[in-house]
Image: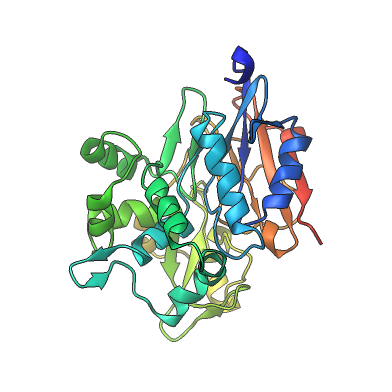
């Protein structure tokens, strides 16, 4: 810990997506100051929820700031779906890349590739660094994952990999449909989603056409698909009002109200930051889309408190 002080708490920060300047302002608001090129706090550490890359205006700067904090033991970070996608996109197995170089996949990484266009070795060093990061973190008092805590899948991952970390073998296996690794990566970094009825689709706020929709993983008594929806884009009314099928109920994951606090990102929320359940906070408030970059100041409480959400707005 900085200056040899005792650790008193964690500041958990949502999806940065290249908003380095907003991140600096948020860290300063939280009481962190640069020392030897690293943001430090005398009594606290940061946990980043992943998705540092893509979309935003200062991706290289954001990566440098976060990596310096992690390597100086002033922060920890879990992988987001954007880091996992980048790893697969740039990793070859035999004569192909693990993630298809389609127009859609290239578009997701366009801003990141542009920023590193003249520095391929630097970009490779960040890809190598991503491989050292975990998919989830578990502490005695709280848990951290990018999108969804699935206790059963996490137990299987631990049995095979020892903890939350991944390696090149994991990447190769995750690129194959149906493997444990593919299930773990999808569930932990993208959450639970369900298919729309055949022939229906949603065009999301980021311009992608989607045939699936994201659902809550903490609502045991949901009756309709509208009760389950957890994304900014609405469902077609006829779907929202339909009762949940037995098949889809079997695919639901429930994070119980009796479990330790959980922190996630990923879901592009709007409005004033608040807990989505008494023990769950989503800290992704669309910073890159002129929203808020959000942190939660955690000090061991079992129920989350409204006043402990802290945020800044992205630079205009």
Question: x, y (%) of residue 136?
Answer: 42, 40
**Which residue is painted at 52% across and 54% down in the image?**
216
Residue at coordinates 57% horizontally, 43% vertically from top-left?
A: 66
**Residue 95: x %, y % from top left:** 20, 72
Quarter of the rendering occupied by the N terminus: top right
Which residue is nearer to you in this view: 160 or 59?
59
Q: Nearer the viewer, residue 203 or 64?
A: 64
Q: Nearer the viewer, residue 47 or 239?
A: 47
Residue 103 vertical position relative to residue 26 in the rendered view, above or below = below
Left or right, 135 with respect to 170, comes to: right
What residue appears at the point 31 percent right and 62 percent down from the top-left corner?
91
Color scheme of the displayed model: rainbow
Is 78 on the left-hand or right-hand side of 62? left
Total marks in image = 0
Instruction: State the residue at coordinates (52%, 42%).
Output: 67
Seen in the picture, residue 17 relative to 36 is either above or below; the reply is below
When asked about the image quadrant of residue 155, the answer is top left
In this rendering, does residue 190 appear at all?
no
- The quarter of the picture where residue 261 lies is top right
Give the vertical position of 59 relative to 241 (above or below): above
Residue 47 pos. (x, y %): 56, 36
Q: Residue furthest bottom?
A: 199
Q: Position of residue 59 (x, y in %)?
A: 59, 58
Residue 43 visible? The answer is yes
Q: Is residue 249 left or right of residue 19?
A: left
Using residue 189 as the reference point, say whether residue 316 is left or right of it.
Answer: right
Judging depth in this view, the residue of 298 and 22 nearest the camera is 22
């Amino acid at each position: 810990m900085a200056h040899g002080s005792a650790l008193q708490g964690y500041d958990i920060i949502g999806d940065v997506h290249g908003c380095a300047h907003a991140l600096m302002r948020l860290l300063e608001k939280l009481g962190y100051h640069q020392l030897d090129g690293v943001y430090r706090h005398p009594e606290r550490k940061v946990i980043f929820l992943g998705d540092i890359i893509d979309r935003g205006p200062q991706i290289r700067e954001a990566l440098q700031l976060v990596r310096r904090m992690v390597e100086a033991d002033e922060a920890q970070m879990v992988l987001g779906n954007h880091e996992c996608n980048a790893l697969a996109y740039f990793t070859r197995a035999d004569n192909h890349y693990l993630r298809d170089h389609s127009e859609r996949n290239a578009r997701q990484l366009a801003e990141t590739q542009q920023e590193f266009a003249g520095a391929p070795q630097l970009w490779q060093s960040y890809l190598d660094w991503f491989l050292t990061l975990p998919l989830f973190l578990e502490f005695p008092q709280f848990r951290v994952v990018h999108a969804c805590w699935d206790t059963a899948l996490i137990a299987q991952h631990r049995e095979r990999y020892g903890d939350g970390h991944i390696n090149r073998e994991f990447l190769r296996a995750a690129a194959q449909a149906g493997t444990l690794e593919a299930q773990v990566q999808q569930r932990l970094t993208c959450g639970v989603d369900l298919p729309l009825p055949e022939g229906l689709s949603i065009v999301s706020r980021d311009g992608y056409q989607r045939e699936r929709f994201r659902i809550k993983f903490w609502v045991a008594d949901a009756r309709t698909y509208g009760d389950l929806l957890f994304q900014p884009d609405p469902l077609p009314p006829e779907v929202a009002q339909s009762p949940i099928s037995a098949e889809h109920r079997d695919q639901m994951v429930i994070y119980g109200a009796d479990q330790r606090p959980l922190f996630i990102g990923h879901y592009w929320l709007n409005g004033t930051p608040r807990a989505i359940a008494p023990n769950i906070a989503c800290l992704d408030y669309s910073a890159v889309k002129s929203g808020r970059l959000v942190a939660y100041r955690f000090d061991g409480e079992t129920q989350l408190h409204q006043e402990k959400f802290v945020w800044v707005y992205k630079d205009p």
